[in-house]
Amino acid sequence: MSTAERVVIYTMNHCPYCLKAKQLLKQRGVPYSEVLVAEEDDAQWDALFERSGMRTMPQIFNGDQLIGGYTQLAEHDEKDQLKSLLAST
């Protein structure tokens, strides 16, 4: 798995927390892939909910592991500036 495929962030249009999460990943040099989820795509929302248990955006994964949303990403960043994500990519 390449580094860009390791961290995946699911986002939606007009989502300020999605933008903040992407900015934080970029600032820390963490490569990521982005998947834009349409508000009206019920199948994609259902699949994400089954995977994460979350109904909010963004949803951020490191491989198969759920990091969470922006708040969890920021908490992770406070601990190690996302170095652990870089080490696992």
Image: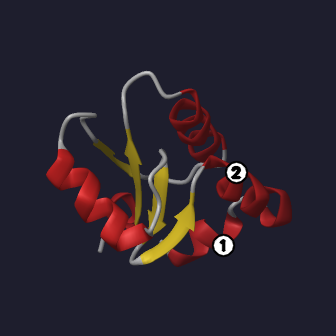
- When the figure is inspected, residue 18 is found, relative to residue 16, above or below; the finding is below
Q: Which mark is residue 72?
A: none
- When the figure is inspected, residue 6 is found, relative to residue 28, above or below; the finding is below
Q: Dot 2: within a 10 Å radius of its alpha carbon, few (fewer than 14), some, or many (20 or more) residues?
A: some
Type of the residue with mark 2: Thr
- Name the N-terminal-most of marks 2 and 1: 2
Type of the residue with mark 1: Ser
* In this view, the mark in front (2 or 1): 2
Q: Residue at 15% of width from left, 54% of height from top?
A: 43
SS under mark 1: helix
Near-viewer residue (1 or 53): 53
Kindly identify which residue carries mark 1. 84
Q: Position of residue 63 (x, y in %)?
A: 40, 74
- In the rendered image, the residue lying farthest to the right is 79
In the picture, the quarter occupied by the N terminus is bottom left
Q: Dot 1: within a 10 Å radius of its alpha carbon, few (fewer than 14), some, or many (20 or more) residues?
A: few
- When the figure is inspected, residue 46 is found, relative to residue 65, above or below; the finding is above
Left or right: 85 in relation to 52: right
Q: How many marks?
A: 2
Near-viewer residue (64 or 52): 52
Left or right: 21 in relation to 6: right
Kindly identify which residue carries mark 2. 71
Quadrant in the picture for residue 20? top right
Q: Residue at 69% of width from left, 66% of height from top?
A: 83
SS under mark 2: helix
Q: Residue at 56% of width from left, 67% of height from top?
A: 67
Left or right: 54 in relation to 76: left
